[in-house]
């Protein structure tokens, strides 16, 4: 085989890998709430972050997501008690409720990183009060896993939804204001 043919095949393989490789995309551009629906709460952009200012509701990304890796940084602004979360793979918010029933990566003080309904979904990795924390949520098939500040926190299985929305929870009256930034998603399957 000629050297040019080998190099041509190698370049073709590299190009194909680039086309089909999953690349992270910004869900939040740091400048506006384009790409988001604000439901039942008040949210604004402040210093490159989404500030959840008031209300009980959701800041929901437009579109649905199947298998994905979601990376985000968050910071609670309340000093004593804070409560928020990130919902994923839900298709509706039941009437008369501000949030879906499941699935939520909790951001409540003392429960940061826990996921309800799964005994193995408890986070033991410390978070930093009053500072930025980075979470990485991987959802593939019926399995979800979480990294907290770069450390493995948990893996659970038994998710019963194949796709759904992603949203930031606003629970300001009881949980204070929150900031979210560097929100990126890598789709592992087509939308």
Image: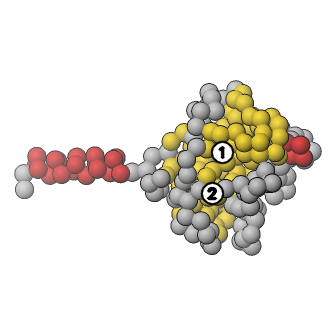
Q: Is residue 111 visible?
A: yes
Q: Point out which mark residue 60 bears.
A: 1
State the residue at coordinates (74%, 57%). 94
State the residue at coordinates (55%, 47%). 63
Q: Quadrant of residue 170?
A: top right
Under tag 2, what secondary structure? loop
Spot occupied by residue 179 in the image (x, y as percentages of width and height): 74, 37
Residue behind mark 2: 91
Quarter of the image that includes the N terminus:
bottom left
- Is 142 or 165 nearer to us in this picture? 165
Q: CA distance from mark 2 to mark 1?
A: 11 Å
Q: Quadrant of residue 95?
A: bottom right
- Is 163 or 145 nearer to us in this picture? 163
How many residues crowd mark 2 within 10 Å: few (<14), some (14–19), many (20+)? Answer: some
**Mark nearer the N terminus (2 vs 1):** 1
Spot occupied by residue 77 in the image (x, y as percentages of width and height): 83, 38
Residue 16 as seen in the image, left or right of residue 103: left
- Residue 11 higher or lower than 110, as above or below: above
Residue 160 as seen in the image, left or right of residue 81: left
Marks 2, 1: nearer the viewer: 2
State the residue at coordinates (62%, 27%). 31
Spot occupied by residue 130 in the image (x, y as percentages of width and height): 82, 40
């Amino acid at each position: 085989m000629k050297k040019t043919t080998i190099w041509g095949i190698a370049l073709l393989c590299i190009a194909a890998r680039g086309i089909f490789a999953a690349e992270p995309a910004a869900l939040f551009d740091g400048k506006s709430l384009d790409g988001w629906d604000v439901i039942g709460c008040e949210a604004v952009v402040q210093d490159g972050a989404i500030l959840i200012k008031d209300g009980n509701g959701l800041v929901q990304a437009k579109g649905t997501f199947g298998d994905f890796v979601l990376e985000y940084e968050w910071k609670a602004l309340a000093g004593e008690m804070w409560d928020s979360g990130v919902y994923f793979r839900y298709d509706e918010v039941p009437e008369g409720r501000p949030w879906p029933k499941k699935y939520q990566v909790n951001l409540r003080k003392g429960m940061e990183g826990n996921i309800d309904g799964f005994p193995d979904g408890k986070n033991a990795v410390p978070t930093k009060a009053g500072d930025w924390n980075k979470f990485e949520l991987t959802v593939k098939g019926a399995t979800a896993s979480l990294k907290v500040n770069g450390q493995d926190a948990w893996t659970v299985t038994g998710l019963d939804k194949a796709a759904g929305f992603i949203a930031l929870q606003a629970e300001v009256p009881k949980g204070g204001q929150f900031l979210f930034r560097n929100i990126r998603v890598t789709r592992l399957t087509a939308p």
